Image (cartoon, rainbow, N blue to C red):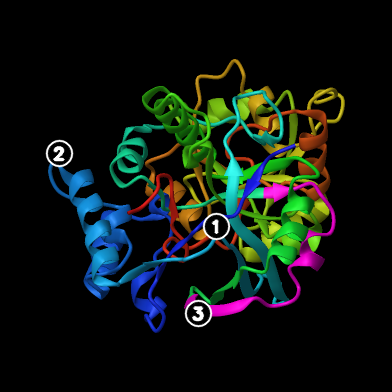
Amino acid sequence: MPKIAPFNAIRYAPGTDLQAVIAPPYDVLSGEDVAALGARDRHNIVHVDVPVGDEDRYEVAAAKLSDWLVEGVLVLDEQPSLTIYRMNFTDATGSPRAIVGVLTGLEVVDADAGGVLPHERTTPKAVTDRLDLTRATATNLSPVWGLSLASGLTEALAAPGEKLGEMVAEGVVHSVERITDPARIAEITAILASDDVLIADGHHRYSISRTYRDEVREARGSNETEAEFTLAFVNELVADQLSIEAIHRLYTGITIEQLQADLADCFDFAPASPPTPATLTEMVELGRLALLSPDGTATWLIPKDAALAGVRALDGAYLEYALAASTAEVSYQHGLTEMLDLVASGTVAAGVLIRPTSLAEIQRTAREGLLMPPKSTFFTPKLRTGLVIRPTAALA
């Protein structure tokens, strides 16, 4: 089971306009996004989390973080705490939703050691940027998102903590509350430590934390430093605490005709109406995928049970299996509008809309120690960066 560690958090000073200084996670930001956020406030977290400039940008970011602490822009908590993080929003069906979890230190474990589990295979990604930034700032800036398989966490977080502030982004109210009461901290950490945590989002961030931990161990000759843990948002793996959307597939390196031929062994085809948001619901109801062609037409892909027998009941797994011998090269895109625009532009041969992964399949993945195909799940809303910063070394 994973170890859980409350910590002395770094936070923006009381009274700070969080709307001006909090940002989305670095990996969803474009250069234009970073510039706009940076222009919003000179203390916006992107100035540290997404440093721009020359080779010394990480050292500049570290110096800026240090200056903000000295100036009182950021404040270090006097005692270890947990932070309740709530996200309140209206989902795609128009229903009000409330997701609650806790920001804490989550143990960094070796691959396959158990306790903290990956839930999907990851695609190759450069890790130098995040590792260099962690080395320079000695902090965890963006949290990993973990799903606790333990029961009772949602109930334990129902009562409010010390309210610290809130901000609104894309219709989602993000709010944080501090917990310092030792008894309540003990209750929550005991729940978290009683079962595995499944990484929902931030696999690369967690991998970087492992590399950083190993470097600190070698440099300090100790495995009892703050680098043994990383910043994580953990909520309970239950239906009302998850909002999961699909990450669709785009294909290049092939013609649409050849792609259809490659898919024909595993799918039946049927004409479909031009996709709308309602199509995504219809796909779930009918048990189908949707192939998007550059000419604007759409085709239902109806899985052939016999051909796909033995393949896990995941659309991503179905497509991997069907195209295992194909020349098609796959990339990933979230959002129906973005998919339609890319396919219509002719820059890709075709797109395939897939269905969101079910809660049951996520739970099965965790309990059986299996891995889903890359980009199987898109957890929403996206966590904000800057609400809590976790030091990985003692601060003077």
Three-letter code for the amino acid on which mark 3 is drawn: Gly
Say if the magenta span includes residue 161. Answer: yes
Residue 234 pos. (x, y %): 65, 54
Q: Position of residue 92 (x, y in %)?
A: 66, 69
Q: Tell me how far mark 3 sits from mark 1, CA to CA.
A: 33 Å
Q: Nearer the viewer, residue 86 or 82?
A: 82
Q: Earlier in the sequence, mark 2 or mark 3?
A: 2
Horizontal and vertical percent position of residue 229: 54, 41
Q: Nearer the viewer, mark 3 or mark 1?
A: 3
Which residue matches tag 2?
Answer: 55
Q: Nearer the viewer, residue 251 or 245?
A: 245
* Lateral position of residue 240 relative to residue 247, left or right: right
Dot 3: element: strand
- Decide: marks 3, 1 in contact (CB < 8 A)? no
91 lies above or below 285: below
* Residue to which mark 3 is pinned: 165
Q: Give the labeled residue for mark 1.
A: 336
Q: Residue furthest bottom?
A: 15
Left or right placement of residue 23 versus residue 307 in this view: left
Circle 2: element type: loop
The magenta segment is 147-168
Amino acid type assigned to the residue bearing label 1 in the image: Leu
